[in-house]
Image: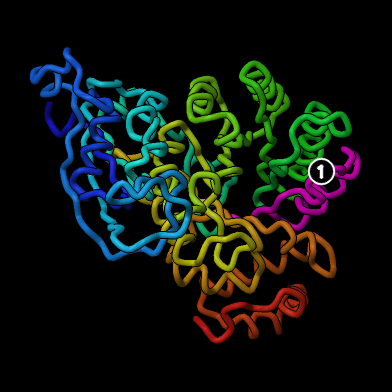
Amino acid sequence: MTASFEVVATYLVETYLPLEQAAEAIAGEQSTGTFTAVARETPELRERFAARVLAVEEIPATGNADLPGATRPNGAGRAGTAPQAGKRSARVRVAFGLDNFGPSLPNLLAAVAGNLFELRQLAGIRLLDLDLPAPFAQRYPGPQYGVRGTRELLDRPDGVLLGTIVKPSIGLPPEDLRLVVRELAEAGIDFIKDDELMGNPPHSPLAERVAVVTEELDKAAARTGRRPMYAFNITDDLDRMAANHDLVHAAGGTCVMVCVNLVGFSALAWLRERCALPIHGHRAMTGVYTRAPQLGIDYVAWSKLARLAGADHLHTNGLSNKFYETDEEVLRSIAAVRTPLLGGYETLPVLSSGQTPGLAPETYRRTNTTDLLVLAGGGIHGHPSGPGAGVTAMRAAWSAATSGTALDAAAAQVPALQEALDKFGSPYAGGA
């Protein structure tokens, strides 16, 4: 088995056992082994199919709590939550032969994750990264539009792309949605999307939303010469998801949104094969995999799978967000989405969660790119002068950030920006 036909998984491993023993437990459980030797696990079979531990790099203790049921030393029984002396941590790299599962996302996950998180030899286990071989590129075409295709559809060849989420998230009747879309389009927004909570409810059926929104966007395009992209949430069971896509496409819609974790990577890949529109990949429920530092799947690994499956846009969170992630974690997620994968898989990072105009300078300074889709929900809809002024404020803030103009100087020229700064503040005041 050559390296080019192996998947290499990198883990954070925490254990009271010798690190090498814990690493071998991972390799055995996730390939040919079990809890005891079996007759037909021959040397020849292991040589071809057994996962191989490539490296065990001990790192300083993390201080993470133990996973429930973790084996303690000297037969001391099963752990609760608090760590005890003797626990060690390491970055472990394990190679899995592609012959074991082929270029298949669900079967890849069975190998590199599967029962792994349940092993009691491990007091902590987190999949950090995946190095994937070329056959995955042959099987999964990945994003159909990505950064460049999205810019072409929007006729925005450069500059940050600015968007919002329809608010209130749910409960808005279609005719009120019409007014929201009209105001946002008139203000020059690039992108609007359904909230992930808005699917196909009785009070606002998808078919009615599609009809109302596309009509308003067509009218806006006739008046202004620009047509914002609207991502309709088509998340549903497979048969309904395909029908929802067809409904949006037939009406002249230009984007669909899918909650990646709620349908799964395989369903996303299935949709990608049939999809004629950009797929806006929402990360709802990602915290289940990413939030606990000693457990789960890191965003870096998760985002690679979502990109392979076909997400053209992928949520990363934004700086100073309302959720748990630190700025450093968000920046690492943005960098992960922007890093080439298997020579391509260009996906547009989507910054969201508590985004306001005051964040623009620091976001631009620390990402050093405008290949971003920045979504401000409350930061636009909560503007004192309404959503249209919210769009104006965001546009002015990003123009100032990319030109090196101080926000207060820009706000002196754009009253809507000053109003936004007065209400939301500038968390990084004094920075670049």
Q: Is residue 196 above or below residue 66?
A: above
Q: Quadrant of residue 215?
A: top right
Q: Which residues are magenta?
A: 161-189
Q: Quadrant of residue 9?
A: top left
The N terminus, quarter of image: top left
Q: Nearer the viewer, residue 8 or 222?
A: 8
The three-letter amino acid code for the residue at tag 1 is: Ile
Q: Residue 172 in magenta?
A: yes
Left/right of residue 389 with respect to residue 248 in the rendered view: right
Can see residue 223?
A: no
Can see residue 185?
A: yes
Q: Residue furthest left?
A: 43
Q: Position of residue 187 (x, y in %)?
A: 75, 58
Residue at image mark 1? 170
Label 1: how many residues lie within 10 Å, few (<14), some (14-19) or many (20+)?
some
Q: Nearer the viewer, residue 155 or 117?
A: 117
Left/right of residue 258 with respect to residue 48 in the rendered view: right
Q: Residue 348 in magenta?
A: no
Q: Quadrant of residue 351?
A: bottom right
The residue at 47%/41% (across/down) is 146
The residue at 69%/53% (across/down) is 164
Left/right of residue 252 with respect to residue 334 in the rendered view: right
Q: Is residue 250 above or below residue 145?
A: above
The residue at 69%/29% (across/down) is 252
Q: Position of residue 184 (x, y in %)?
A: 77, 53
Q: Position of residue 121 (x, y in %)?
A: 32, 42
Q: How many marks?
A: 1
Q: Coloured how?
A: rainbow
Q: Nearer the viewer, residue 179 or 202?
A: 202
Q: Secondary structure at mark 1?
A: loop
